[in-house]
Amino acid sequence: MEKEISIGLLGLGVVGSGVIQIINDHQKELQHQLGHSIKVAKVLVRDIEKSREIEIAEDALTTNPDDVINNDNIDVIVEVMGGIDEAREHMLKAFAAKKHIVTANKDLIALHGPELEQAAQENGCDLFYEASVGGGIPLLRSLSDGLVSDRIEQVMGIVNGTTNYILTKMDEDGQSYEDALADAQKLGFAEANPTADVEGLDAARKMVILARLSFLTNVELDDVDVKGISDLSIIDLDYGKKLDLTMKLIGFANRHDNQVEVSVQPTFLPTTHPLSSVKNEYNAVYVNAEAVGETMFYGAGAGGLPTATAIMSDVVEVIKNKLLGVNGKQLIKPSFKKELTPPENKISQFYLRLHVKDEIGAFASISELFNQRGISFERILQTPKDNSDLAEVVVVTHQTSLQNFTDALKLLDELNVVKAVKSYFRVEGGA
Amino acid sequence: MEKEISIGLLGLGVVGSGVIQIINDHQKELQHQLGHSIKVAKVLVRDIEKSREIEIAEDALTTNPDDVINNDNIDVIVEVMGGIDEAREHMLKAFAAKKHIVTANKDLIALHGPELEQAAQENGCDLFYEASVGGGIPLLRSLSDGLVSDRIEQVMGIVNGTTNYILTKMDEDGQSYEDALADAQKLGFAEANPTADVEGLDAARKMVILARLSFLTNVELDDVDVKGISDLSIIDLDYGKKLDLTMKLIGFANRHDNQVEVSVQPTFLPTTHPLSSVKNEYNAVYVNAEAVGETMFYGAGAGGLPTATAIMSDVVEVIKNKLLGVNGKQLIKPSFKKELTPPENKISQFYLRLHVKDEIGAFASISELFNQRGISFERILQTPKDNSDLAEVVVVTHQTSLQNFTDALKLLDELNVVKAVKSYFRVEGGA
């Protein structure tokens, strides 16, 4: 009675190899769940001859996409080739051939998710992408099924392991950004060209996916304010420590009065916040929902085997749906109308570092300027700068709007005593 | 085309009221997910006249269980009455009447889960109990769906909010156990009779459920080694701080070579361990699995609304299954043969506190005794005790077996220099 279910792979890199390894190693568990065994029937690769560590029959490899996409024996395709245009074409063809697709491709889903979901639905196919955010953490499933009856208000995520590794090293070892990046590259946590990671683009793509699922509205990449960590100075991290604040690259998605705000930016959190203790290459997503309150999901955000675990959870779901005859029926359609939060409704605390003339009344005039805009300070640090007539002033404001804060910054420029605005960051997660 | 789906409730306490509140407040979200609205048609209560804060039509209340269980309009029953025998009888009758059941009743599931799952299956019914462990954290779903293709090796959980609140107060404020318990009772985090919480029974029931799902084997309550926190001394928590260890009541479930070990006991963790920063009444479950590595799920472990959120996620799943015609087809049957880990295979580090004679050679003879059993020390603290000829010795061992450690403890008794074994605890989560 035992039947074998054949799947196809597009791509055989680190994640694709992880998928094959899990299928080989955990066949017993999978069979227990499904009553069927799983076999990798065909794998699209660029070079068949390339030596590989993974065990796979040579006749399972092909350089012709059609051998996977239009293979009558294959019902489920796992897309792990990465990239955008070619992967998108393969997936649209595969849906036309009535194949279900599981993908880890965050770039593609962030850019073309709605188009692909529509194509899936029109063809009665499943499209799942648990592995696209947070690696092995069962995150999308938790948001869309676990919190299905709740109203998610805010999502804060450490969704990029490379930048979290770099920030951890800067914070714990006092390394400069450049040194920490070089270390991360040496250890394989950062790529030779780290731009997409350190400039926040990778995190932004993941936040698009999280925001869509959380708020059921069609957030796009252009809606996300993105700022990376490459300009960060160790000086601000050190001031942060004095203020009991930890710097993290936070993907932020918030809905208030049906206005949606999504950003990725270096953000200070209280050291006691659960996200502050997420170290090194780990990922975590912290969710605030109306009924459930705070929840957090933590784990390995990348890596072949963790990501492959998420892929296989989707593959199992596709196969279960197939055995029950319900494929293509569980897609969530973004349907609430999207309205973006204007700057006057983006509310947070701010950290601000200034160089000011070290003279009587200097701080009073700054304080007065902020007060006039209704902004008061929660914390103030003032330190004379060695060998100069300047002082370094760091303040943490109480909550105010982004509009209000940036207006105040402009007025600061006109103040004679202010020599330079050195840096400012949002402060989230406070009381 | 819009249809209304009627559900019934058994019980209308804090959690039942939460269910009704969520259905009232989030009807729009639910309708969006299901294409149908949800209505609470009948609620079994003990006293119809009792004044309630929740909005519910008086004719929806009944004192006759049959009005819910044998109500032709009701397909889904939410059991939130608690207790064991009566709830079990109602549920068995409800399955016989082909009703699907969602429950938050950890006691019942821990004791009679397999019997109830069998009854559900025989009647083609769903039985879900996400709310039984970890309140609003989507935990069971993550373990059974998210990690479906992985092999879970170890689960460590802070699954009881009352004891975690008490331990946090002891740790942070230096309160005694008695004072912290009194505070917890004042704030509603502990019940007037706190026995089930503080003696570990509540946690043990939850760990039975987690271990069954994680290892797919029929763990029973009698298989769990249980030790509560009522004997804990602030002295040990203080020594823990000096050793960078945090005391938590840890539910521990481990599988190694198909041997399964489940326990609940006060346990020291490194302060850097993710579970150490779980404070107050919060819950968290930390999972080690072969492929995915470490993941952690964190959130409110109790409370009406969080627990109701978990219940409603199950209700939505039952209704989706109903719309797809696949109810009763997704149960996991525990099927791997259970083998319990013998004491010689229970491996951990240990913390041990002794009173010894403050004389030359005392520590050497203790050290010698442990060395003879192959147990070496990772950390040692020795402090003279004021106004006595005794010294207090605290050691943390390297990894050894429980058998080996308890054998060594027995031999310690025979050593003339050892005046008393004051306490010992497992140390988990070390390198």
Image: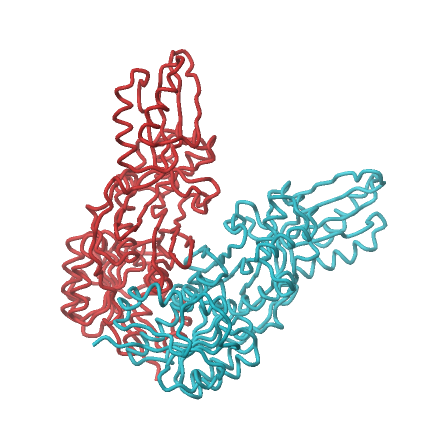
Chain colours: A cyan, B red
Count of numbered tags: 0
- On the image, which quarter does residue A201 sit in? bottom right
Q: Is residue B64 left or right of residue B104?
A: left
Q: Nearer the viewer, residue A120 or B342?
A: B342
Quadrant of the drawing holding the C terminus of chain B: top left
Residue A186 location, x and y as percent? 61, 55
Quadrant of the drawing holding the N terminus of chain B: bottom left
- On the image, which quarter does residue A260 sit in? bottom right
Q: Residue at x 44, y 55 (%)?
A: A295
Q: Residue at x 57, y 64 (%)?
A: A203
Instruction: Establish if B205 lies above or below B388.
Output: below
Q: Residue at x 38, y 65 (%)?
A: A22
Q: In this view, does B96 lie to the left or right of A327?
A: left
Q: Is residue A162 left or right of residue A425?
A: left
Residue B109 location, x and y as percent? 22, 55
Q: Which of B283 and B105 is in front in this view?
A: B283
Q: Is residue B203 visible?
A: yes
Q: Is residue A144 left or right of residue A225?
A: left
Residue A113 location, x and y as percent? 51, 77
Q: Nearer the viewer, residue A105 or B364?
A: B364
Residue A419 location, x and y as percent? 83, 49
Q: Nearer the viewer, residue A60 or B132?
A: A60
Instruction: Establish if B188 lies above or below A73.
Output: above
Q: Can residue B60 be seen in this view?
A: no
- On the image, which quarter does residue B69 sit in? bottom left
Instruction: Establish if A400 lies above or below A55.
Output: above
